[in-house]
Amino acid sequence: MKNTKEKNEYLKKYRQEERNKENRRKASRKWQRNHTAKIRPMCFKAYSGDPPKCMCCGETTMEFLSLDHINGGGKHHRKAINKVGNGFYDWVVKNNFPEGLQVLCHNCNLAKGFYGECPHKKQSEL
Ligand SMILES: [Zn+2]
Ligand SMILES: [Zn+2]
C-alpha cells in the first residue's frame, strides 16, 4: 500500500519534471527564433546598408535574403562553424562582421551555386 503511494508520488514528480523540461525547451526555441529574427537584419544591414538588399538583383524582402561568401567555399565554412541552424549569424556577429561576405537573395545565391554565377550577371553584360 505504502509502496504504491510512493510510486505514484514519484511518477507525479517525474511527469511534472518532464513537463518543465518541455516548457524550457519551448522557451529556448522561442528565444532562438526571436534572437535570429533580431540578428539577421543586423547582419544584412552591416553588409548591404539600410534597407538591406540583394547585391545582385536588388531584392529587399528580408525573408529572401541570405549571407553569401563572395569567393565561394560557403558550404565548407558553414559546416565548420555552423553547429545548429542559424549559428552562422551568431558567428558573423561574434566575429565583428568579417570581410568576404555579401547579401544575396536565395535566387541569386542558389543560381551562383548552380551555374558559378547568377544569370542576372550575364543579362547585365549583354
Ligand atoms: Zn537577388
Ligand atoms: Zn542575381
Image (cartoon, rainbow, N blue to C red):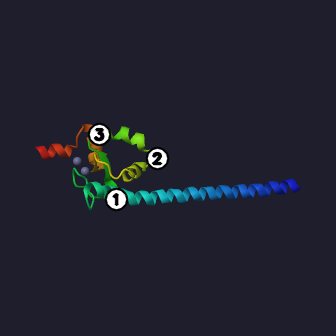
Q: Measure the C-alpha gap from mark 2 to mark 1.
A: 19 Å
- Mark 2 residue type: Val
Separation of marks 1 and 3 at Cα, in angstroms:
22 Å
Left or right of 126: which side holds 27? right
> Residue 53 is drawn in which quadrant?
bottom left
Disc assigned to residue 72? 3
Cβ at disc 1 under 8 Å from ligand 1: no
What is the C-alpha distance between the residues marked 2 and 3?
21 Å
Disc 1 residue type (three-letter): Met
Residue 40: image x %, image y %? Answer: 36, 56
Q: Which mark is residue 93?
A: none
Q: Secondary structure at mark 1?
A: helix
Identify residue for label 1: 42
Identify the mark nearer the N-term, 1 or 3. Answer: 1
Horizontal side of residue 53 vs 83, given as left or right: left
**Label 3 secondary element:** loop
Could you tell me residue 73's position as x and y percent?
A: 32, 38
The answer to whether the residue labelled 1 contacts the one labelled 3, judged by CB atoms less than 8 Å apart, is no
| Residue where numbered disc 2 is placed | 84
Q: For the point 33% across and 55% down, which residue is it?
A: 43
Check disc 3 and give the amino acid type. Gly
- Which quadrant holds the N terminus? bottom right
